[in-house]
Amino acid sequence: MEQYLEFQNIGKTFPGVQALKDVSFRMDGGKIVALMGENGAGKSTLLKILSGEINDYEGKVLINGVEHHFSTPKDAINASISVIYQERQLVSQMNVMENIFMEDLPGGKFGMVNMNQLKKRTQELIDLFGINIRPTDTVGTLSVAYQQMVEIMKSYRRDSHIIAFDEPTAPLTDTEIDILFRLIKQLRDEGKIVIYVSHRMNEIFRITDEVVIMKDGRFVDKVATAETTEAELIKKMVGRDIGDTYAGLKRNEHLGDVFLELKNVTTDYVSDISLTLRKGEVLGLAGLAGAGRTETARAIFGADPIISGKMIYNGQEFRPKSPKDAIDKGIALCPEDRKEQGLILNMSICKNVSAPVLNKVSTMGAFVSRKEESAVAEKAVETYAIKTPTIDKITKELSGGNQQKVILGRWMSDKVDTKLLILDEPTKGIDVGAKAEVYRMICEFARQGIGVILISSELTEVINLCDNIIVLHNGHITGELRREEATEENVLTLAMKD
């Protein structure tokens, strides 16, 4: 019997926000259906209703014509539904096999877990996915990309009839994406209902059969992927034709003096890193997953100690012992994993923006001035067009794009004298409209004389935004490209060079 999933008149309201309003559409088994829309369109809220994470809503969820109302995520799992979110649902202290089979550990004698069977079944999955990890590896020690693959293996193992992927490829290499797409197509061919959420247009046209477009919490349209174009999808998503997202950017054409220099810097994760950064320059760090891009940024930010080599900053040798040392010198980092490392999700926008400058919005060094703290947050909301009814809104309730703007607002406050801004995957998981805004901001920061280091897995971003590009592979630099030399072919050639 053909499977189908139907949403009927779904509505959901959060304080001050209508997240979903009268959403109705159907998805059929044997098809990969993209769910698209700008950040804040309601995609994540809809998935949370499907997964049982949100249970107070209007309307009906029907599976094969039967209404289901899940009170908890466990109810949804028991109904053969798996949702793989951007935020990983893993226990970092446990190993790979324990995470994958957490609620279904194979039993052995005397009520004990059959460890041999557990290890064997996990290894079979690892072999199927073709990745270089072991069943006994602790998840917290794995890269973000491998953690994502463990998350996907966990859902694949459940053999769910409905599987939703929320931005699954963001941390993955091209090889890992090929593996994932092969498995997703296999799920489709088995007749399963596959929901695919992504802002990467090339993926939408490569893997999906249909596209559901949402805007401002409402259903807009459902179209066959083969019968539409990227321009048409964007217009339906944003309500206007935004054209080329890189067109019209006002770049900084007048770079200043060198103010950051790494000379043969080595940490536990990278070796012999040498580079220079000028005032007002956008310097790209490119490479495949695990190349050492983030690790280079962490060394500059004081998160990983420099073992040997020199870091020259504003003409003086500087070796930050901690991120606080770096922040005090005007170095700021927007990390790759904004939810785990960049934000305090259960606190307000106001508290997140003011976190680095509490000493500057306090009286007598002890009592935070609500008036000054609010002024800093209000300016960030206004400057970066953060969509929120109030600065007191809890940050985890914001869309991914608006969360990213909160981090930018934090570091670009008048109270913070940021001279060097490190952006690690700044557009990860945000929509095409928000990306265009981030690109504009990056160019504006450079025109203000701020040095920007940009790390991105999207080569088009690195090529179109950066003045110079440093390419890394396996923890060391394999080459450097000027803007006029930068092509995808040239970057990838260096990225795969030993």
Image (cartoon, rainbow, N blue to C red):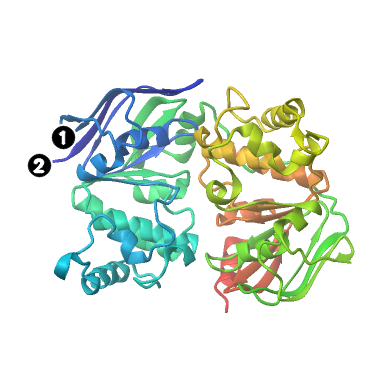
Q: Residue at x 65, y 32 (%)?
A: 350
Name the N-terminal-most of marks 1 and 2. Answer: 2
Q: Residue 349: where, in percent of width, then height?
A: 62, 33
Q: Residue at x 24, y 68 (%)?
A: 118
Q: Residue 235: where, in percent of width, then height?
A: 49, 31
Image quadrant in which you'd find residue 103? bottom left
Seen in the picture, residue 116 relative to 97 is either above or below; the reply is: below
* Residue 30 makes an appearance in the image: no
Image quadrant in which you'd find residue 291? bottom right
User: Looking at the rendered structure, which numbered label has been put on residue 1?
Assistant: 2
- In the displayed structure, does residue 99 sit left or right of residue 273? left
Pick the quarter of the image with the C terminus: bottom right
**Of helix, strand and loop, which one carries label 1?**
loop
* Residue 115 makes an appearance in the image: yes
- In the displayed structure, does residue 379 sit left or right of residue 14? right
Q: Alpha carbon of mark 1 to alpha carbon of mark 2: how far?
A: 9 Å
Front residue (pair 241, 286): 286
- In the displayed structure, does residue 95 sit left or right of residue 263? left
Is the residue under label 2 in contact with that under label 1 (CB below 8 Å)?
yes
Front residue (pair 217, 301): 301
Q: Residue 345: where, in percent of width, then height?
A: 54, 40
**Of helix, strand and loop, which one carries label 2?**
loop
User: Looking at the rendered structure, which numbered label has been put on residue 64?
Assistant: 1
Seen in the picture, residue 185 relative to 383 is either above or below; the reply is: below
Residue found farthest to the left:
1
Kind of residue at disc 2: Met
Between marks 1 and 2 in the image, the one whose residue lies nearer the viewer:
1
Pick the quarter of the image with the N terminus: top left
Crowding near pointer 2: few (<14 within 10 Å), some, many (20+)? few
Q: Residue 231: where, in percent of width, then height?
A: 49, 37
User: Looking at the rendered structure, which numbered label has been put on residue 5?
Assistant: none
Q: Residue at x 53, y 40 (%)?
A: 400
